[in-house]
Amino acid sequence: MAKSENTAHTRWASLLEPDAQTLEELRRAGNGATQLTQCGVRWDAVVIAPLERGLASLDALRLSRDAGYPVIADYARHELIVQVPAGTAFYDCASVQGVRTLTRGSWLLVPLGRFGADAAAWLSRPTPAGARYVDPARLREAVHTADEERGEHAHASC
């Protein structure tokens, strides 16, 4: 039986600071720990800053952390990177303040394994059966919800 996305779950916000084991593995990750990947072919990416805001947005969506949604934390830049279906990021999220979209023509360093160089780590990896992409329209609304809950109102409308 598949798990419901609305059941009690561990909050994404708990991943704001990497634990000691994660920090050690990030320190040991070498230059070959990432792969430059073209966006806009199989997926686009939505980059949310700061990381805390992105994690709060995923909590607002109530997505399960182990459901195969491709999500990367860039601890060095303090950003969250969420993969969404190709061709959808710009239309749904480009006008949100503090959000960048990576679409066709953009490239992203993606961690190989769990960790990559430059303090990037998968918080949720695609499953072997394939990725479950976050709906960018729902993600946009979740960013607005997270902003309201944090008392920070986004000034740009979508």
Image: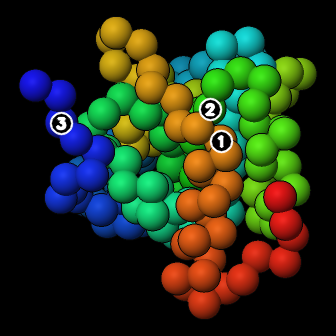
In this picture, is 71 found above or below 139?
above
The disc, 2 or 1, on the residue closer to the chain's N-terminal end is: 2
Q: How far apart are the two marked residues, 2 and 1, measured between alpha carbons?
A: 6 Å
In this picture, is 149 found above or below 142?
below
Residue in the picture at 45% in, 20% down: 131
Q: Local crowd at mark 3 within 10 Å, few (<14), some, or many (≥20)?
A: few
Q: Position of residue 51 (x, y in %)?
A: 56, 63
Residue in the picture at 75% in, 37% down: 89
Determine whether, in the image, residue 91 is placed left or right of residue 8.
Answer: right
Question: SS at mark 2?
Answer: strand
**Quadrant of residue 16 within the rendered picture:** bottom left
In this picture, is 101 found above or below 158?
above
Residue type, numbered disc 1: Pro
Query: Is the Cβ of the residue at disc 2 closer than 8 Å to that at disc 1?
Result: yes
In this picture, is 47 found above or below 154?
above
Q: Position of residue 81 (x, y in %)?
A: 60, 44
Q: Position of residue 102 (x, y in %)?
A: 79, 35
- Quarter of the image with the C terminus is bottom right
Query: Is the Cβ of the residue at disc 3 closer than 8 Å to that at disc 2?
Result: no
Residue under circle 1?
136
Residue in the picture at 89% in, 22% down: 105
Residue in the picture at 71% in, 28% down: 44
Report whether residue 91 is seen: yes
- Quarter of the image with the N terminus is top left
Q: How far apart are the two marked residues, 1 and 3, measured between alpha carbons?
A: 22 Å
Residue type, numbered disc 3: Lys
Residue under circle 3?
3
Residue under circle 2?
84
Determine whether, in the image, residue 117 is placed left or right of residue 122.
Answer: right
The disc, 3 or 2, on the residue closer to the chain's N-terminal end is: 3
Question: SS at mark 1?
Answer: helix
